[in-house]
Amino acid sequence: MSPFFSDPILALESSCDETSAAVVVGTEIRSNVVSSQVDLHKQWGGVVPEAAARAHVEAILPVIEDALAEAQITLNDIRAVAVTNRPGLIGALSVGVSAAKALAYSLKVPLLGVHHLEGHLLSTLAGRDGLPFPHIGLIVSGGHTELVEVTGYGEYRIVGQTRDDAAGEAFDKGARVLGLGYPGGKAIQEAGAAGNPKRYKLPQGLSGVATIDFSFSGLKTAVLRLAQSEGDNISVPDAAASLQETIVSVLVERAIRASQSLNSKALTLVGGVAANRLLRDRLAAACEQEGVEFITPPIDLCTDNAAMIGLAASVRLARGERDSMDLDCYATADL
């Protein structure tokens, strides 16, 4: 029996500031439509929960319609509905969950709630027959920085994590201090492309100890103090390159250490920060040197999207997992 659900799944994602709908069959992504709120939240320099929820309400039906059209199917062809229901912004999550319940009820098909981080971990399934086990998954985003030992589908153990702030938050706050705008990860990458990554020495949290945990709060403070001390003399490209170099080097070092200690067959890189080109290249080179397979999804599957929720649901639906119409939303939830 196939480990994947063989019929069309309509998946929804609305955990933060992206409204997305996708159609997934097995591990094939038939469509993946994302309505971004970046321009909306740029004026505030970060996500405003109430504004995000209102934007989801406006976008949810159009993205569903576009996803069905792109997949060249109708609602009557859908055989299951999956939706992110944890963790995330409660108001944002509730829009997707309410839509999913209504669709599942009217279509008389199974409903399934999916953990957002499992969606990221299994985004690597796109177009593949399966994943090697055990492997280490590095989840890096604005709200998460974790190393996860994956011993099977649905079998996850967090082995390393940030003790304070996420790597994505360090990118965002660093970009704000340097006047580069929002979202920070892309802005830092672009500004640092012409910079000298060795110009400014920035702290690598928890350096000097054999750990697979992370700490980025000190780095954020160091960038602020650098900007204050240098004033108008600061080289923004060099500062951006130095910040990116510091974050990437720490992520690669800890991920490889985890892979070595747990005899991992592969290392996967997922989450919004996985779109960073330097991080992708450095991890790929490090894995090749270690003789470990490196797996990362296409860049359009790194940021929040419904296709990854559909891929995670494909595994769980094939095992007979279902949720009732009492499905709830949770701001925080263990993986």
Image: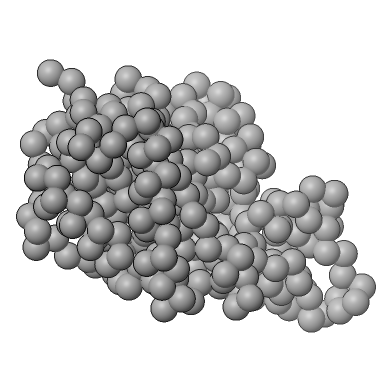
Tell me the residue at 49%/68% (across/down).
165
* The N terminus: image quadrant: top left
User: In the image, is residue 16 above or below residue 230?
Assistant: above
Visible residue check, residue 140? no
Image-quadrant location for residue 309: top left
Name the side, left or right, on which 4 lies relative to 202: left
Tell me the residue at 15%/31% (across/down).
318
Name the side, left or right, on which 330 lies relative to 54: left
Q: Position of residue 182 (x, y in %)?
A: 64, 66
Visible residue check, residue 100? yes
Tell me the residue at 56%/71% (across/down).
41
In this orientation, which residue lies closer to the viewer: 255 or 144? 144
User: In the image, is residue 88 above or below residue 261?
Assistant: below
Q: Position of residue 60 (x, y in %)?
A: 37, 58
Q: Position of residue 43 (x, y in %)?
A: 63, 76
Name the side, left or right, on which 255 lies relative to 325: right
- Numbered disc total: 0
